[in-house]
């Protein structure tokens, strides 16, 4: 597929006896598939951010999660990616690097499953569940306390 795509990007395709130039707009994939395609570590690795060089901290006692707390890390560039400037970010070479595309901007992070449903939304639901449980414990037993007096 990569070789065919490379040929199409370089030479275009023939359509109604006209040569039509092809551009790759973006590669859409969920986070695990994107990491596999790019040959990089997964999103929960401390070098897993695909857009910047932030290093994450893993928290063992607080719910086993990776947090990326820095907001001023250098942005990743296609040149840095191809030169392996952050070697901990890469797992293996990928055939996609043979394509004349930007290895950073052509792989958008638009993955609601891993960003929201399994990320912040899961934490929010757990938080709301905890608050609701505490609320119910406090106010449901209040009438019972009155009957005890
Ligand atoms: Zn980042």
Image (tube, rainbow, N blue to C red):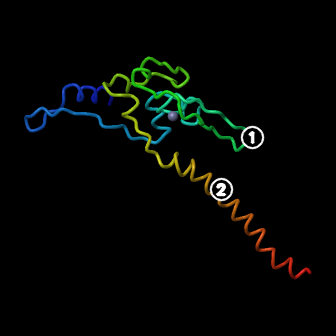
Label 1 packing within 10 angstroms: few (<14), some (14-19), many (20+): few
Q: CA distance from mark 1 to mark 2?
A: 17 Å
What residue sits 28% from the left and 26% below the top? 6
- Image x and y of residue 120, in percent: 57, 49
Work out whether residue 144 or residue 2 is closer to the camera in this orientation and state it: 144
The correct choice, above or below, for 11 with respect to 147 in the image is above
What residue sits 62% from the left and 57% below the top? 125
The correct choice, above or below, for 109 with respect to 78 in the image is below
Residue 134 occupies quadrant? bottom right
For label 1, the SS is: loop
Residue that mark 2 sits on: 126
* For marks 1 and 2 on the same chain, the one whose residue lies earlier in the sequence: 1
- Image x and y of residue 9, in percent: 24, 28
Work out whether residue 139 or residue 100 is closer to the camera in this orientation and state it: 139
> In which quadrant of the rendered image does the C terminus lie?
bottom right
For label 2, the SS is: helix
Work out whether residue 138 or residue 87 is closer to the camera in this orientation and state it: 138
Q: Residue furthest right?
A: 149
Residue that mark 1 sits on: 61
What residue sits 45% from the left and 21% below the top? 93
């Amino acid at each position: 597929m990569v070789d065919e795509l490379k040929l199409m990007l370089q030479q275009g395709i023939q359509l109604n006896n006209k040569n039509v130039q092809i551009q790759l707009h973006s590669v859409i994939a969920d986070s695990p598939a994107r990491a596999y395609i790019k040959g990089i570590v997964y999103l929960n690795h401390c070098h897993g951010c695909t857009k910047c060089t932030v290093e994450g901290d893993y928290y063992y006692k607080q719910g086993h999660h990776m947090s990326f707390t820095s907001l001023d890390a250098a942005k990743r560039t296609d040149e840095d990616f191809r030169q392996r400037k952050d070697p901990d970010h890469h797992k293996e070479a990928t055939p996609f690097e043979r394509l004349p595309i930007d290895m950073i901007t052509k792989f958008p992070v638009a993955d609601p499953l891993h960003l929201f449903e399994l990320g912040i939304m899961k934490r929010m639901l757990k938080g709301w569940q905890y608050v609701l449980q505490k609320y119910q414990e406090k106010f449901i037993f209040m009438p019972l306390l009155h009957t005890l007096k």
